[in-house]
Amino acid sequence: MARGVDDTLAWMNELTAEMEERRKAVHKGGGEARQHKQREAGKMTARERIHALLDAGSFVELSVFAEHLGAQLMAGVAAPGEGVVTGYGTVSGRTVFVFSQDFTVLGGSLGKMHAQKIAQVMDLAVKTGAPIVGLNDSAGARIQEGVDALSGYGEVFYRNAVYSGVVPQISAILGPCAGGAVYSPALTDFVLMSRGTSYMFITGPEVIRSVTKESVSFEELGGADVHSRKSGVAHFEADDDMGVIATIRELLSYLPQSAKEKPPFKGTDDPETRETPELLSIVHPDQRRPYPMLEVIRAVVDDRKFLEVQPDFAKNILCGFARLGGQAVGIVANNPRHMAGTLNIDASDKAARFIRTCDCYNLPVVTFVDVTGFLPGVAQEHAGIIRHGAKMLYAYAEATVPKITLIVRKSYGGAYLAMNSRDMGADIVLAWPTAAVAVMGAEGAANIIYRREIQSSPHPEATRAAKIAEYKARFDNPYWAAGRGYIDDVIDPKDTRRHLIRHLRMLAHKEEKRPFKKHGNIPL
Ligand code: HXC
C-alpha cells in the first residue's frame, strides 16, 4: 500500500537519522577511551590532523562507511572507517588528497579495505593531478587478515612506485610505523617525523632482542632523531603533530600539483636588484677558512626564506627550497663548515635524491660550489663511494630543469664535475672572484708535477713554495676556467641575487629533449 506524504517524510527522516547515527559511530573511531590515550601520548586524532592540515571547512570524506572484509578472526570486531580516514580538501586553496590512519581503531593496522581506501585517494590524486599526503600512525599489517593484509600493502606500494614522479607524495610519520608500514613512506618523495611520538622500523626491539641479542629502545631504534641524523630516512622532523603539519603546508607551497605543472609563483617585496654586500664579509678569500654557507643562501634568496631538507643528515651538503624573484627553486650547496664540505657517501645520496626530486617537479636547481673533492679514506672506498658519488653525476646530467651553478670558492677534481659543471649540463655557470677551478689544490698539485725539480733543487722548500705560488697564480682564480669557456661570467658577490634571478627568468621556458629510453639505470 502506498504511503502518504507524511509517512514518506517520516520514513525519510528515519533513514537520514540512521545515516547520521552511523556517521557518528564512524567519527568516534576506536572510542573516547582510546582517543584519550592518543592525546595523553601527545598525539592528535586522525581527524584532528586532517583538519589541521587542510584549509578550514574544506575536507570532503570518501568511503565513509567502509567495513573490514570479515576475515574469520575479525568476527565481531568493529573497525569504524576501517582504521583510516580518507578524502580531499585544499591547502592554501589548492586540492590535496589525504589519508590519515586512526591508531584508535585496531592500532591503525592495515587490512585489505583500509588499503583500498588509501589506493582510492591515490588513484584520484593521479587522475586529477594533485598531491597525496599520508598521515601515518599504524601498527603495520593487520595480523587477523593474514595474506589479505599483505596484499593490501602490495596495492599501496605498487601505487607509490608507479605514481612516483607523477604527483608529489608526502608521508608524515605521527606514531609507530612498524613492519610494512615503513615501506610506503620510504617510497614517497618526503618523510616527516614527529619527535618523541613516532618510530619507524622493519623489526621492533622485541624481535631484535630475540634474534641478535641487542637491547634497544623504540626511540634509539627508529625515532625521529635517528632517521633525521643517522639513517637519512626522514627529510624533516618537528616537535609534535602540529609542527609536522605546518612543515607539510610549507613544503607544498614550493611544489607544483603534478609533474605536468610548474611550481606556483609567489610574488615578493624583496627587490630583485637587492645587493648583498654582507656576503663580502661572510665568505673568506682564504680557501681553508670555513664559513656558514647557509648564510650565503639566506642572503641571496627572497625574504631570506630557505626550507632546508634533511638539515641534520650529511651536513657537508645543504639541500632545500627557496624562491628567487618569486620562482621556486631547489638549492644544493657544499657546506665548508662540515667535513670541509667534501662529498662523501651520505652527501652524494642526499644531493642526488634531492636533485631528482627537483627535476620530477620542475624546480630549477641552483648549485653553490665550494668543494675540495670526494672524501678520501678506505672506509668510504670500501662502502662504495664510487657507486654513490656516481648518483650525483647521474642526477645532475639527467635533470632537464634549468640548472645554474655558482662557484663561490674552490671547485676541484671530480667534485667540480659532481657539482654540476658546464659539461655535466649546467645552463649557466657563474663564479665569484674568490673562485678557483683546478684538478686539485695547489700544494698537492705542485708536489706531484714538480716532484723532480723540488727533489733536485739545492733549496727544496724554497722551490716547492715557488712552484706552489706559480700553480696558484695560474689556477687559483676563476679566469683560467672562464678563459676556456667553462664559466660564463665572474660576478661581484653583492650582485649575486640580481644575476641569479635574471638567468632564471631567461631559462623559464627551457626545454631539453633526450634520446628515447625506457628509463635510465641510475647506479643504486
Ligand atoms: C591488528 C593490532 C596490531 C596489528 C596492534 N594492534 N598491532 N591489531 N594488527 N598488527 C591492536 C592491539 O591489539 C590494540 O588493540 C591496539 O592495536 C593498540 O595496540 P597496543 O599494543 O595496545 O598499543 P601500543 O602499546 O601503543 O603499542 C603499539 C605497537 C604494538 C608498538 C605498534 O601494538 C605492536 O608492536 N604491534 C605489532 C606490530 C607488528 O608486529 N606489526 C606487524 C608487522 S609485520 P585494542 O583493542 O587493545 O585497542 C608487517 C608485514 C608487512 O607489517 C610486510 C609488508 C612488506
Image: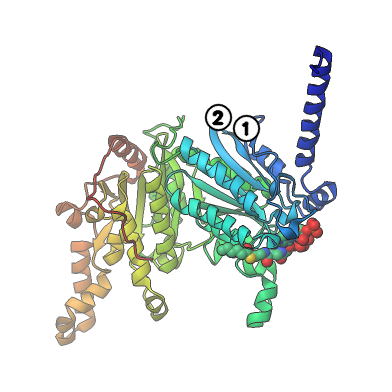
Residue 428 visible in the current orientation: yes
From the viewer's side, name the closer residue of 19 and 258.
Answer: 19
Residue 235 visible in the current orientation: no
Q: Is residue 30 left or right of residue 329?
A: right
Q: Is residue 439 above or below residue 401?
A: below
* Crowd class of label 1 (few under 14; some 14 to 19; many from 20; radius 10 Å): some
Residue pictured at 38% horizontal, 74% vertical: 384
Say the numbered circle drawn on residue 93. 2
**Residue 95 percent coordinates (x, y):** 54, 33
Q: Secondary structure at mark 2?
A: loop
**Residue 403 percent coordinates (x, y):** 31, 47
Say the numbered circle drawn on residue 55. 1
Q: Is residue 163 left or right of residue 427?
A: right
Q: Amino acid at mark 2?
A: Gly
Q: Amino acid at mark 1?
A: Asp
Q: Quadrant of the N terminus?
A: top right
From the viewer's side, name the closer residue of 279 and 270.
Answer: 270
**Residue 239 percent coordinates (x, y):** 67, 52
Q: CA distance from mark 1 to mark 2?
A: 7 Å
